[in-house]
Amino acid sequence: MNFWQRRTGASVLMLLVVVSMLLAGCDTGSSGTGSKYGGSVTIVPAPNGVFTRNFNPFLANSSRTGTQGMIYETLLMFNRMNGNSQPWLASSYSVAKDATSITFHLRQGVKWTDGQPFTSDDVVYTLKLMQKYPALDGNSLWSTIQSVSNPDASTVTVAFKQPAVTMLWYLGGQTYIVPEHIWKNISDPSTDANPNPVGTGPFALKSFDPQLYVLGKNAHYWQPGKPYVDELRYPAYNSNTSADLLLSQGQVDWTGLYTPNINKTFVQLDPTHNHYWFPPSDVVMLYLNTAKAPFNQLAVRQALSAAIDRQKISQVAENNYDPVASPTGLVLPADQKYLNAAYANSTFSVDAAKATSLLEKAGYKKGANGMFVGQDGKPLAFKINVVAGWTDWLTASQIMASDFKAIGIDATVNVATFNDYISALAQGDFDTAISWTSPGPTPYFLYNSMLNSTNTAAIGQKATSNWERWNDKATDTLLNQYVSSTDEATQQQALAGLQKIMVEQLPSIPLMYGPTWYEYNTSHFVGWPDQSNPYASPAPYNAPDAELVALTIHQP
Amino acid sequence: MQFLLRRLVFYLVALWAAISLNFLIPRLMPGDPVLLLVARLQGQVDPRAIAALRLQFGLNANSSMWSQYVNYLSNLLHGDLGTSIAYFPSSVAEVIGLGLKWTMILVGVSAILSFFIGTLLGTIAAWRRGSWFDTTLSPLLTFFSAIPYFWLALIVLYILGFLLKWFPLTGAYSLDLEPGFSGPFILSAIYHAILPAATIVISSMAGWMLGMRNAMLTTLAEDYVLMAQAKGLSERRVMITYAARNAILPNITGFALSLGFVVGGALLTEIVFSYPGLGYILLQAVQSDDFPLMQGIFLMIAIAVLGANFLADVCYVVLDPRVRQER
């Protein structure tokens, strides 16, 4: 009996193995046949559970990756790697001299995938939709927009309540145009999953399954000869591990995953085809609560900054993936052209002696135990908040705490759950915390979210992004100068001033860059962005940047 | 009958308590789904999006706890579990439906397999106590169950899937196939389920086996077993009908509980094998403060546990004459 059972068991297993081999054999594969055209790209932007059929471009956080960019397009295409833009659905634009309006001239001959022509009515409709449903207005456009008009079928003018050059990014680079003739029939676009999207983009939904969705090539795309690839496949993976395994086997072409020890686990398995590039995307900061003592004292902020061994943090905590940040708070090299010439070569250096003398000059004295005590007799002690389980930042915080202890400051690491961590930041209920910044195509965006007093709140009230509670007239004036001028020299002057504030006032302390995660395999497709050709922000989760990558890659 | 009726009333009260706790507990947790979402994306979401997100999720309403509770109960009665935040704008029922079938098949089948194989092995081990079968199998299975599950699963996946390529690395079926009731699709689904199911069975079997073995040993010392043997009944009949039938009762209760928890999914299995299911959906719900989705899944678990326990009670009535005769 046992024998028979074992036999059947084994033969069932064999049968399954054979069947699967046959199935695997059916896979046509996409290896190069000499033609630039064709092939199917497999993309894993990030681990995800099952997919829901949501292709609503306004619901950026729950719609499927690719909805923005691959299916629905923007008026302009910005390259976050250098801040330049190129014409997209708009063939040109002009910003009014006083920066109170922008006029877009739309491209002729663009068609929706259902054959209807794309006109200025669609653009106006899209913007008015966001006015009618504030839930769709993800960038608060209507807090700035005064009115929208379209004098003819290919012109759209958007007027603002106050000068706002940065609206070019939000309107041109981050607003996805939807077709009026379809969306006017949707009863409530703010809760509609838009299961059958019709866009202008290079790809359209081909098939959907909770485990895999496929975007197929739009044969009538407005850029002649593009895209080169036939389809984009997005499979669902629950964990980095499984996506990593497939990536290393060449079954996945493009991912945006954090991979520890990437040279060993990925590149070395196939050095000619397996590549990665982690360009800096934002600056990781040590936020100091400047609304309270001792962090309201410049000397203390300067001393803390001088005590930190950033090189060690980058090496030990971050696998060398994240280089040490610039003191200016710029994301280099992407922001290179905005760099204030005075800081062209400025870098951070560890200087414990300087830190000590700064504190002594500020009135702190070393007590019997070698730790600093303030003039009020209180020891100089604080906590560094970090999220439990974010091991790299945890290590970084521990390194900083020991750096601070070494010069006589009693710093301790405060590990909290994500919930507690983020609510402490928002409410101002913290001493210091390691955290991220919100970048944009120019340095203005990072500075504005981090430093503008309109983004902060009193301690105990929720601040949106200025968590360190920097409240400075000069800073606000510079930010306002940038946003209300169309003159590049004036803008650059504002950015240079903001850099000066970052370097001299240290509203928060730059540590290292936060990377963009991006791994790719060149065995089936080439033309990927890399360090020598940074034509787009390369992560598959960045929209609409990923569209540019999908339009450029092709079979070898 | 009266016994079952009494149990039924108990289960209804328990269900109400479960539903109410289900409502309360997520609301006692600190956190704000919108801030969490913005924060989790670490700068990818412009802070300007916060107001719009709040509106999207309907979080601006400042209604009292009591009116929320009444609303929640009335929606439940209408079968409306609400709208998920993590999977916005899909309804909770739709999201649960995405994972439920895979969870039921994978975890359900492996729980049943594990129970039957483990109980059978335990019965045989106790019957032949001291034999090589007993002395090798018990430590071996204990060893497997002592290995942390995710480690066992990763090793199995790495060796059988990655190195030997005998089994697929991820997913519930081959993505080249159109899902449906077609031969190739079902074969592919079975093929993909073998590794995850096998790891669950291997790691959970020991519990059933040891439990059954111990209960059997006690039962085997009973007079009626001796009596059955003295009557000259066949060995198999004494083992199954006399000893095992009495020894299995505690295992049945345990089995009912574990069946109930099947709908909670097998989070580690789902993560290691990238297998779709409710465990991962629940994890995402917790991570994004998605109260409606959490409540929906907890409700399912509560109903399933209570329902399975009720079935266990019914089984007791059938298996144990003493229960039938009480009062």
Image (cartoon, rainbow, N blue to C red):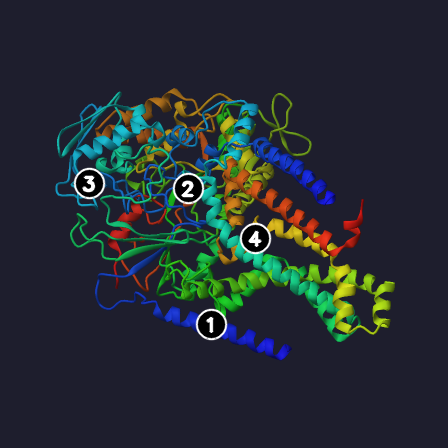
User: Which numbered mark, 4 or 3, is in the foreground of this view?
Assistant: 4
Report helix, strand or loop for mark 1.
helix
Tell me whether marks 4 and 1 sit on the same chain: no
User: Which numbered mark, 2 or 4, is in the foreground of this view?
Assistant: 4
Q: Do the residues labelled 2 and 4 touch (CB within 8 Å)?
A: no
Numbered label attached to residue A325:
2
Q: Quadrant of residue A61?
A: top left
Tell me whether marks 4 and 3 sit on the same chain: no
Chain letter of the residue beneath label 4 in the structure image: B
Q: Do the residues labelled 3 and 2 touch (CB within 8 Å)?
A: no
Q: In this view, does A115 lie to the left or right of A192?
A: left
Image location of residue A140, percent across then percent down: 33, 28
Q: Which amino acid does label 3 sit on?
A: Leu
Alpha carbons under labels 3 and 1: distance apart:
50 Å
Residue A299 vertical placement versus B248 (above, below): above
Alpha carbons under labels 4 and 1: distance apart:
25 Å
* Viewport quadrant of the C terminus of chain A: bottom left
Image location of residue A180, percent across then percent down: 22, 35
The residue positioned 40% from the left and 23% from the top of the image is A453
* Viewport quadrant of the N terminus of chain A: bottom right
Q: What residue type is labelled 2?
A: Ala
Chain letter of the residue beneath label 1 in the structure image: A
Q: Earlier in the sequence, mark 3 or mark 1?
A: 1
User: Which numbered mark, 3 or 1, is in the foreground of this view?
Assistant: 1
Q: Mark 3 points at which residue?
A: A89
Q: Which of A412 and A167 is in front in this view?
A: A167
Q: Is residue A9 visible?
A: yes
Alpha carbons under labels 3 and 2: distance apart:
36 Å
Report helix, strand or loop for mark 2.
loop
